[in-house]
Amino acid sequence: QVQLVESGGGSVQAGGSLRLSCAASGFSISTKSMGWFRQAPGKEREGVASFYALIGSTYYADSVKGRFTISQDNAKNTVYLQMNSLRPEDTGMYYCATTQVSWIFIPPTRANSNKYNYWGQGTQVTVSS
C-alpha cells in the first residue's frame, strides 16, 4: 500500500536552512505528482511545492519561490524539500502527499488539494526570529 514518511523537520533560527525528506513506498514517485503542504496552527493548509518527474514540472507557492527547492531521487523513491532563508512564517507542520491518479501533473493549489489522496504523518518545522 502507499506509504509516505517524512523526516528532517526541526527548529532553526530565521535565515537558516532545513531539508525535508519524504520516503515513499508502494508506488513509484516518478509516475505521480509529489507535493509538499504545510499547515500552521489556526491557518488553512497550504500547498508549498510539487514536482512531476516525467516532464520535470514544478510548482511553488509565491511565498516560497526562490527559497525552497523540491527534488526527488527516483532510485531512492524519495522526495526532498530544501528550505533556505527560512522565516518565522514558514513555521508549521509539513506534509508530503501524492495523488491517486498517475501520469499527470497536479499543482497543489487550493482547488486541487482534494486530488492529493495519500498523506504522510507530517514533520514539524519551527523557525524562530
Image: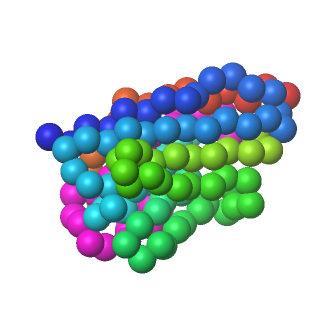
- The image position of residue 6, as x and y in percent, is 43, 33
Q: Is residue 129 above or below residue 56?
A: above
Does residue 90 appear in the picture of this structure?
yes
Residue at the image position 42 percent from the left and 77 percent from the top: 55
Please tell me which residue is depicted at 59% across the width and 62% down the height of the picture: 60
Residue at position x 47%, y 72% in the image: 56
Could you tell whether 70 is left or right of 3 in the image? right
In which quadrant is the N terminus drawn? top left
Residue at the front extreme of this rendering = 75
Location of residue 91 (image quadrant):
top right
Locate residue 97, reporting x and y percent: 37, 47
Whether 112 is among the magenta residues is yes
**Residue 52, placed above or below residue 48:** below
Tell me which corner region of the image, top left, top right, bottom left or bottom right, holds residue 19: top right
The quadrant in which residue 87 appears is top right
Q: Position of residue 113 (x, y in %)?
A: 38, 57
- Which residue extends farthest bottom? 55
Residue 103 in the magenta stretch? The answer is yes
Instruction: Tell me which residue sits at (22%, 64%) in the image.
Output: 101
Can residue 42 be seen here? no
**Residue 54: % across, % down:** 37, 72
Looking at the figure, which quarter contains the C terminus?
top right
Q: In the image shown, does 21 or 108 lie closer to the viewer?
A: 21
The range drawn in magenta is: 89-114
